[in-house]
Amino acid sequence: MQTFDLGKEGLRALNSSLHALKGQTNMTAWEVINPKGAHAIAAGVDAPVDITVRGSTGYYCAGMNKQATIRIKGSAGPGVAENMMSGTVIIDGNASQYAGATGRGGLLVIKGNASSRCGVSMKGIDIVVHGSIGHMSAFMAQSGNLVVLGDAGDALGDSLYEARLFVRGSVKSLGADCIEKEMRPEHLALLADLLKRGEADGKAKPEEFKRYGSARKLYNFNIDNASSY
Amino acid sequence: MCGIVGLFLKDPKLEPQLGALLTDMLITMTDRGPDSAGIAIYGGAKDGLGKITIQSATPDKDFKDLDGDLHDALGQPVTMKIKSTHAVLEVPLDQMEAARSALSHLRPGVKVMSAGDSIEIFKEVGLPKDVAARFEVSKMKGTHGIGHTRMATESAVTTMGAHPFSTGTDQCLVHNGSLSNHNGVRRELIRQGMTFETQNDTEVGAAFISHKLKSGETLGNALEATLTDLDGFFTFVVGTKNGFGVVRDPIACKPAVMAETDQYVAFGSEYRALVNLPGIEDARVWEPEPATVYFWER
């Protein structure tokens, strides 16, 4: 176990040590202590390592993550796991705005609540939120899955492309071109797998969720509307 | 950007540390805005005495014998405590208007930063650590306070453009964001009799709330009205004699984190600002909801 005291050694030293890990390494377990809300902790990691951050983080923790498993034993500030490519990020507390924004792959698990714009413009990432999410979540989300065990705020899935949204609780309002869709067997199977990987299988059952997706009226050119363009 | 910090103490034991706690919080937010910094502290309200905090670009000249000159004008005792470019005048509460009027004749170059029973405002161009040191903020006691570090967007980097803005007795406001309809709102408020010192958007937000309070609205209603009448981005923290309030616009792009324990309610633009507060490990920490008014009063 490599223990890194952020208060003593500083952010640049941490991230350059993590960036130096390429391919297989024998330093597979890392612990970051005294994060104190610092920004960009463990951003840009590209190695199959396990990193535990003991406390709450500031902006952009685990941004652009590839391969690594990053656990935050606290809450995360804005833009956690932004543009994640692969790997797993697990937050024990809450996440601030635009968690998992533009994420292309991997799994983001938020055990508390996420605030506004969760999964904005997501492009393949899977996000599992044990609590509720704020307004404008999954805005322009293109692909991937967003699973919410609690409620969703205003304008869920506004201008949605092909991401799948699963919400167990209430949805305050749906955004433009986002509609409720039927839950088919393949969706139940997908959800069962996501709940398990998202450490939420004991908390909710797939059949308790509703599925939301794109009505596909906004992003396809409609010849009947030609005069209004 | 801009950084905001705020601290409302529930436990009187922390009151001697208010300035020190706020200074530490504000310095942590320096990289959110290095242009200017300011702090409003509420405390030391003495029976029957009001405080006027003034500022001058030429303090040696303007503050010289000012207490004596005011004493002669008012026929009442006046004390003056000079701190760098600012000074705090203490006059009997029923003489506040007379003192401000006399001040404008005696020292026309002097600006009033704040006036009230307990508020003091210190603000200048520069980094939080320099501004706090200049006014010895860390030695100040009080019941609650608000600090701000500015990244200017809507108006010039000057002392008067720094936050907090005070547009009413014992009132102040700090802002992260930018208002887009401030010129229209300012014109309307001028018509209603409000006066302005700057071209700054935040001063309009402050005067908007002061005008509502003057018209008899509660602090809650005044904050609620910002959501319908002010256009743009804002996280506001507002101070009054009895407490402070928080409101964020409905889009809520501008960050805000709050923490509450038995000893205090704290506000920070980021969690980083709160990490050195006593007992923060066990505090309830949350983000204020968009378009929702919060306030704490004693």
Image (spheres, rainbow, N blue to C red):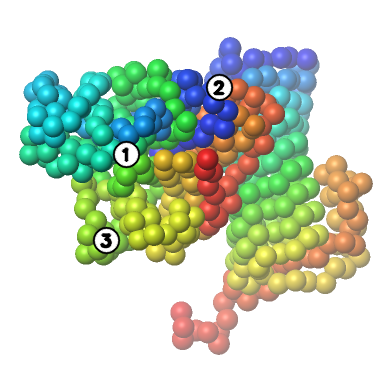
**What element does badge 1 sit on?**
strand
Q: Position of residue B115 (x, y in %)?
A: 28, 39
Question: In terms of sequence position, does the residue under pointer 3 or pointer 2 come before the other?
Answer: 2
**In the image shown, does A147 or B264 lie closer to the viewer?**
B264
Question: In terms of sequence position, does the residue under pointer 3 or pointer 1 come before the other?
Answer: 1
Query: Tag on residue B13?
Result: 2
Q: Are marks 3 and 2 on the same chain?
A: yes
Q: Amino acid at mark 3?
A: Leu
**How packed is label 3: few (under 14 Cα within 10 Å), some, or many (20 or more)?**
some
Give the alpha-carbon distance from disc 3 to disc 1, as whole Å: 22 Å
Query: Tag on residue B189?
Result: 3
Q: Position of residue A100 (x, y in %)?
A: 65, 46
Question: In terms of sequence position, does the residue under pointer 1 or pointer 2 come before the other?
Answer: 2
The chain ID associated with circle 2 is B
The chain ID associated with circle 3 is B
Examine the image and state in which quarter residue B155 appears: top left
Q: Is residue B204 shown above or below B134? A: below
Examine the image and state in which quarter residue A212 appears: bottom right
Give the alpha-carbon distance from disc 3 to disc 2, as whole Å: 41 Å
**In the image shown, does A91 or B37 lie closer to the viewer?**
B37
Count all numbered tags in the image, as a single digit. 3
Query: Tag on residue B177?
Result: none
**How packed is label 2: few (under 14 Cα within 10 Å), some, or many (20 or more)?**
few
Examine the image and state in which quarter residue B188 appears: bottom left
**What element does badge 2 sit on?**
helix
Tell me the residue that label 1 is attached to.
B116
Give the alpha-carbon distance from disc 1 to disc 2, as whole Å: 24 Å
Residue at 25%, 63% (x, y): give it. Answer: B192
